[in-house]
Amino acid sequence: MRCVRPQFQVSVLAVVLSGLLAGCGNLGRTYSEIDPSGAMEDVRKNNGYYALKEVEPGTAKLVMRAQGAPFMAAFEVSRAVAPCEGFEKVGTATDLGRGVVYPWVANMTTALTFGRRPRGYLETEVDPAQRIQLRANSFQHGREFSSCGPFAAAFVPAVNRAYLVEFTWRDSTCSMRVSDATDPERPVPVATENLATCLAR
């Protein structure tokens, strides 16, 4: 789907701020290049990695996150049987370059950009073996309003499984993808039903 002004420019900011923080010797290097283990832990703490590993027995879990651009993505879930009905807002998630910039720089950028601390990921439990509907949209307010999406899909989660719903920007497009990430190291794509009729509601 076509996206309006979705380019991820935070990488430029990352280079500058990382250099200022770490000193001239590290100018042009990202946090993951300077401290790979620390950067990886920062990513995992803020992208739902650990949430995916904790599923209440007898249930299923959704973890939703945005990646690829510093825009907010809003997620909705419906447990209704009727198509396109019963969508409830779960919240918004934002990618602010975790693992690229230092944690305190990411926090400062968040405060300066949004005036509050948006979440890196969202999580919610769902009933296994019951069809759920998902809808996601991206937006950004600034000097210009930018948006991408929406997308809507449905699938049936299995018991004791954790699913990752990713809203991703790449180049000039965006997409939504669902995967079984019960093992977050090895996510497996999940076949979903495209709900194009739900996009206008």
Image (cartoon, helix red, strand yellow):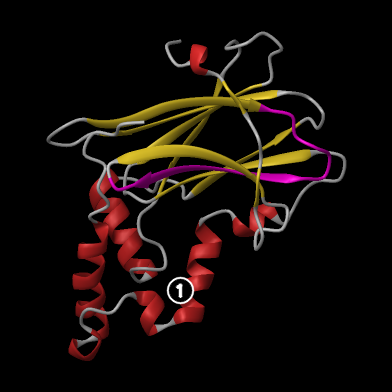
Image location of residue 137, percent across then percent down: 41, 29
**Extreme bottom residue here?**
25
Is 24 displayed left or right of 201 in the figure?
left
Q: Residue at x 33, y 69 (%)?
A: 101
Residue 139 vertical placement versus 67 (above, below):
above
Image location of residue 142, percent across then percent down: 18, 37
Total labels: the figure holds 1
Q: Secondary structure at mark 1?
A: helix
Mark 1, residue position = 39
Q: Amino acid at mark 1?
A: Ala
Q: Residue at x 28, y 79 (%)?
A: 29
Residue 86 vertical placement versus 97 (above, below):
above
Residue 133 vertical placement versus 126 (above, below):
above
Query: Which residues are the magenta region?
Result: 155-171
Quarter of the picture containing the C terminus is: top left
Image location of residue 85, percent across then percent down: 59, 10
Is 120 displayed left or right of 164 in the figure?
left
